[in-house]
Amino acid sequence: MSEQIIESSVADWLRQHPAELVSISAETALIDIVKTLLEHDSRDAYVVENNQVKGHLSFNKLLNHLFSHDRPVHSHRQLFARVAAATAGELMDPHFAYCREDEKINQILHRQLQCDVCDLVVLAADNAPVGVIKLTEVVRESLR
Amino acid sequence: MTESLFLNLGLLLVTGLLLSLVAARFNLPRIALYALAGLVWSQDLLGGVFDLQLGNWSVVLTDTALALIAYLIGGSVTARQLKRLGNTIVFCTVGEVLGAATLVFLGVWLFLSGKAGALLVAAALAVLAASTAPAATVAVIHEYRSRGPLTTSLLGVVALDDAVGIILFSLLLAITTGTSITGAMSMAAVEIGGALMLGMVMGWALAFFGHRVRNPHFFLPMVLSAILLSQGLAEIWHCSALLTAMTLGFVARATFKSGGERLLAPVEYLEELVFLVFFTLAGAHFDLDVLLSGVELVFIYVVARVLGKMAGTNLAARFIAAPESVRKYIGLGVVPQAGIAIGLALSLVNHPVFADSGLLIVNVILASTLIYELLGPFATRYALLKAGEISGEQRYE
């Protein structure tokens, strides 16, 4: 990865590669979230209320619930989740990974890989979401 | 005499895993082969030849494994999900549990009437009849791509009745601990109340610290530590260990709120190991003389449990005016029985109150589980077929 990318700040990166986060409400139906993610070619949705991020939902987690009838083995937890259809608010992970505008790209890459997040949300000082760092963009840029 | 924990356990687990490969190759029920692996090392076979003894370690292992399962079952559902389950699932669960427990109790008690400990054996088998085997039911539903009201109700009932089974079993142990009726009642109140309090405090603490942990690798050790500590405290404070673990799971998930599955998912990976331990240990407790002395009991238990579940669900479904397919066939769908019943029965072997009957109960449950393992999937498939929720072309290849 080039020094230029590694040393650039998140704010600089966002100016050059603006990307909106896929925001949903806690009551959104799971199937609608999947459709939105497919439309935006994204794998990470964020539950946003009053301009604050409340949680994160990954594409895989959503598919795990939506296609549970295709899973031959269920734990008790998965059985209850299948019978009592879950909402985005129940499924979201409130301990989501995020980054700040003043961080360097090299500081957040490890976080993104460890948490298996493709679109990492960027939070402003007041914790309002200002965009996402797309892992695919970072890789594409570094391969140029 | 060899009473080595590692040698015994290693032999049981390795034989179980090797036979599970055979099960996978020839499409045989896995748990039956686990039990067969244990049976190979029972006293009537190689265990007797090599003089291998199941020492006190098997008690510790069974209790720990049961605590893990109770924690997982307690944490498997949230209060919101329980509200959304609907009347059909809740009432049919109550119906099948009460129906099976009542008929098994009456059948066994009448059969053993006049013999010492008849009431205890009847009560123990009655509460063990409550739980089912979700894995067998889910496998049939998946194989035939079944969908409809009966399928949904069936999934809910098999998930819920294991929790009810553990609660009933804890109540039985609590009541049988006392020496008189009033003594038993007050002991039971302390055991149950203390378990709920302890589980709530430990569950809240687990969620509190869980919120502060970001590294996902810490969740498994953190949860295991909480379960072990709660079991230790339950032991010294004379609380029900199973109810403590179940309350711990429920309260931890409820307090953690959304994303609470991160407190459960790491432990779920241990579930197969737990069932491997349960079934191989149960197989190792196999005693031909004991089984032959109670072979009629196996028959009574198997028949009474099925009839009880069918009658109980039918009455419950009528009471809430459930769809006809549910009313007529859900009882047949909840026939399978497996890990939870075996684990709970195993925990009785070294219980002082069941010193004379523990081995008989384990052998009856083991034999009946093998029968249910063979017949259960056919009963579930028949129920789904008659309800019109599967057709021949829908089968997964």
Image (tube, coloured by chain):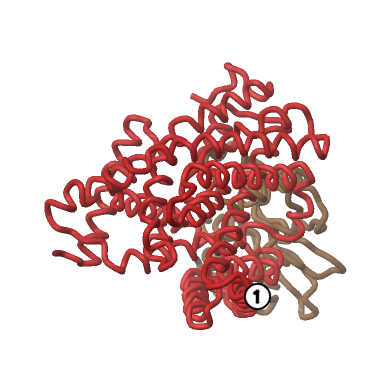
Chain colours: A brown, B red
Does residue A8 appear anywhere in the picture?
Answer: no
Q: Closest to the observer: B314 or A116?
A: B314
- Say which quarter of the image contains residue B309: top right
Q: Closest to the observer: A6 or A35?
A: A35
Label 1: element kind? helix
Identity of the residue furthest to the top in this view: B392
Task: Work out whether B217 lies above or below B363.
Answer: below
The spot of residue B243 in percent (x, y) is: 58, 67
The spot of residue B375 in percent (x, y) is: 47, 30
The spot of residue B217 in percent (x, y) is: 48, 70
Q: Closest to the observer: A144 or B316?
A: B316
Q: Which residue is mark 1?
A: B193
Q: Closest to the observer: A65 or B284?
A: B284
Identify residue type, mark 1.
Gly
Residue A110 falls left or right of residue B331: left
Task: Work out whether B34 lies above or below B148.
Answer: below
- Say which quarter of the image contains residue B249: bottom right
Q: What's the residue at 80%, 56% (across, down)?
A: A24
Q: What's the residue at 21%, 52% (across, down)?
A: B43
Q: What's the residue at 36%, 66% (across, down)?
A: B59
Task: Work out whether B186 lies above or below A133.
Answer: below
Residue A2 falls left or right of residue B388: left
Instruction: Please rate how many residues cluster around mark 1, counting C-alpha atoms within 10 Å: few if below 14, some from 14 to 19, many from 20.
Output: some
The chain holding disc 1 is B
Residue B36 falls left or right of residue B132: left
Task: Work out whether A62 lies above or below B396.
Answer: below
The spot of residue B142 in percent (x, y) is: 56, 33
Does residue B294 appear anywhere in the picture?
Answer: yes
